[in-house]
Amino acid sequence: MLKFAKILIIALMLVGCAEPMVPDPDPKPEPNKEELFKDPQGKSIASPVDIPYVYVNPIDIINLGGELTPELEIRGLKNKVIENKINQEISDKIDGLKSYRNSENLPPYRGIYTRIPAENIALNYNVYSYVTYNFNNVLSIVFTGYYTFNLKGSSEHVTVTDSLNYDLTTGKQLTVSDLLTNDANTKQALSDPLSIIIKKSMDSTDVLVWDRYPIDLVAPFKGIKGNQAFYLTNSGINFIFDYRNPEFNSQFQTIQLSVNFSKLVPNIAFTERFRSDQNIYEQPIRQAEFLDLSENMTREKDETVIYRSIEIYISEFISADVPQFYLDKLPKLLPLIQEMIDENVDTFDFENAYGNINADIIGEYLSLSMYYSIYTDPIIYRELSITYDAEGEVLTLEDLFVEGFYYRDVLWAQLLDTYPGYSSYDKETILDSANFTLYHSGINFSLKIPSEDNPSGSINFYVPYSIFGMENLTLFGYE
Amino acid sequence: MKKYLILFVLFLLLGCQKTVVQPTFTMETYPRIDGSTVTIPLSEAICAKLTGQTIEQVRPYILHTKTHSAYVNLIDKKTDLIFVTYPSVDELKYAQDSGVELEIVPIVSEAFVFLTHKNNPVESLTLKQIQDIYSGTITNWKDVGGPDLPIVAFQRPINSGSQTGFLDLVMKGLTPMTPPTEWVVADMGMLIEAVATYENQPDALGYSYYYFVVDMWGNENIRLMKVDNVYPDNSTIASKQYPIVTSYYAVFRKSEAADSSVRKVVDWILSDAGQQLAEDSGYVKVR
């Protein structure tokens, strides 16, 4: 009996007092189908992708709202069914953002109902929409709403950002799966640079966090989702993190993180995926630009040197993609500035001098520019610009334009349009002095225009490629 | 025989009291909750479970105002239950001065982990070696069985949460060396990045809390260091085999009635079902 009791108690201890069955915890939820990565749309694109330049979609972007609160509509697609569909979705998106002025409709930001109860109407709100990318049959639009709720004397601010990205050939919206080549691991290729940004930025100001709120994670970042919100710019992909990414503690705001195209080359596919042999527009395609594909300012340097009691400040903005070979061709900046100081220190009274070097890759071209000055009155400065083509040959201004195109007439007309007072100057003398620097969407010209006050005077002015027309520019493959 | 019968009855009466029935709430009856950032996913999961809703449905109703603010709100009776790290001396004093006695219940485990490059041949350090490294006594990996390379021992800023944990849980009163400026990394994530990429050499050592390291995207170049030959994982942290462990706590006013909503929630968190939910939410069970 004793033995039985012992066994009974031991058995009870082992089995009987195990915690009684409670309802099983929920099984792990099935992955949300919307968050899965879809198959890429459009043409199959394999790496490496070369993107020398992109064509501007010839659509009109109409502002139906005021100047301060633009509301967009597009016009110019041949297929009006697609055009109407896109415009309806843009309109719906704007209406959705406007509806957030009523707190009942606000997006489910974490904790928002504890601060802004239902049945509150925003004291102020503004909704904006902008086209951020419009090339090679892809259109990207960003929408932003700002709302201020007044609650018993205190105010709560809410920001909502959303986007629409279109393949204009079909009117279908893009997903992140469409962005990179079919042979790329899209989730990894896009999440890796984001992860680095997130890790570096949690307390740092040295990152692109547009809403100025530090990134506050409540859980580890496990990569982007298949339905991750994003929009395109001419330099990268901007990802929107908000209530749809609950690992981010975005408060009642959005966190936007940009992955530069330089991190994604040669897997960028959206520029080629939706291109078509057919012109889908009512107007011919007449404009082209360069995307910003180069590594940004990774060799940025600031330096201050004292020479003959003059403080010389030197800055360098050099893309990491620029080979040292070309930088070595530039004259050394400091001796040039010192020489300028030597020439003028006994004549003028000045305390500071400045110099900078810029170097960037523009399409297949390499653009170097150097500027240095002493802070006299008027400022005395010199500048130098050199552009190399893909073969390493220096480009002249004439080389930029197709034979037979009277670029000087266009340039002079643009100059007078900007500076009518120069009409009395000799056109040919001024244009002969032209120095130029390529940028992604246009050319900056430097022209010597001496005056009695400033014999070494010059001006800079910028002309978009569209003014010349892409068919007149060798940069875009025309001869 | 009588002795065994008494034992048997006592066991029936007392031994099986761990029965925890899952309480149910509406959003109106659910206790007012606050807490730290790191416990937000746990808080949302618990609320969803006990109100019969999805996490997405309850998320707009859960607001954690961070650790110190949560303690102040609890002591000021503006909230009823907070999920936080252990109170600081200042917070305990504020409670005492306010005449509020706090009940502090560990609900999930957390560990302090050391990170190194995946190619670092040193797999384990003792706690003493870690203390010696960070106090500047050991400066070369060869002194802990590794290659002849200086140890790049990263630290975080003094007022950061990880540094507080580092001083309390690891250094335990020892004074860490003053690191070169570039080795003081501004944030937890940046620290991970620095260890992963530092000249691509396996000579770096950093630290963080386990929760943020274990599933973070992009940590494929990181390896967690064994401490006293124990690798930190859910099992060794829950069992406290891994030596540098702490907890996240449910904290509430001791004056809460025995049958209060607050105590029902805390009791349920400590049940098997509650602990399983915590683990499913990315945390380590407390038992």
Image (cartoon, grey):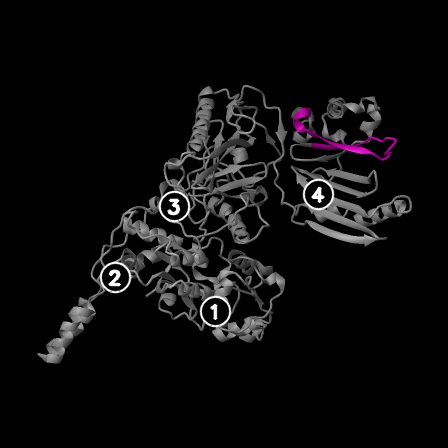
Helix, strand or loop status at disc 4: strand
User: Pointer 3: what residue?
Assistant: A114
Q: Is residue B86 at all visible to an observer of this figure?
A: no
Q: Nearer the viewer, mark 4 or mark 3?
A: 3
Disc 1 to disc 3, how far (Cα)?
Answer: 34 Å
User: Pointer 4: what residue?
Assistant: A359
Q: Position of residue A320 (x, y in %)?
A: 66, 47
Q: Are marks 4 and 3 on the same chain?
A: yes
Instruction: Give the left or right position of residue B179, taking residue A225 as reference.
Output: right
Which of A195/B175 is in front?
B175
Going by the numbered disc 1, the residue's amino acid type is Asp
Going by the numbered disc 3, the residue's amino acid type is Thr
Going by the numbered disc 4, the residue's amino acid type is Ala
Residue at mark 4: chain: A
Which of A448/A108 is in front?
A108
Q: Are marks 2 and 3 on the same chain?
A: no
Span colored in magenta? A443-467
Up/down of A4 relative to A426, above or below: below
Q: Nearer the viewer, mark 4 or mark 1?
A: 1
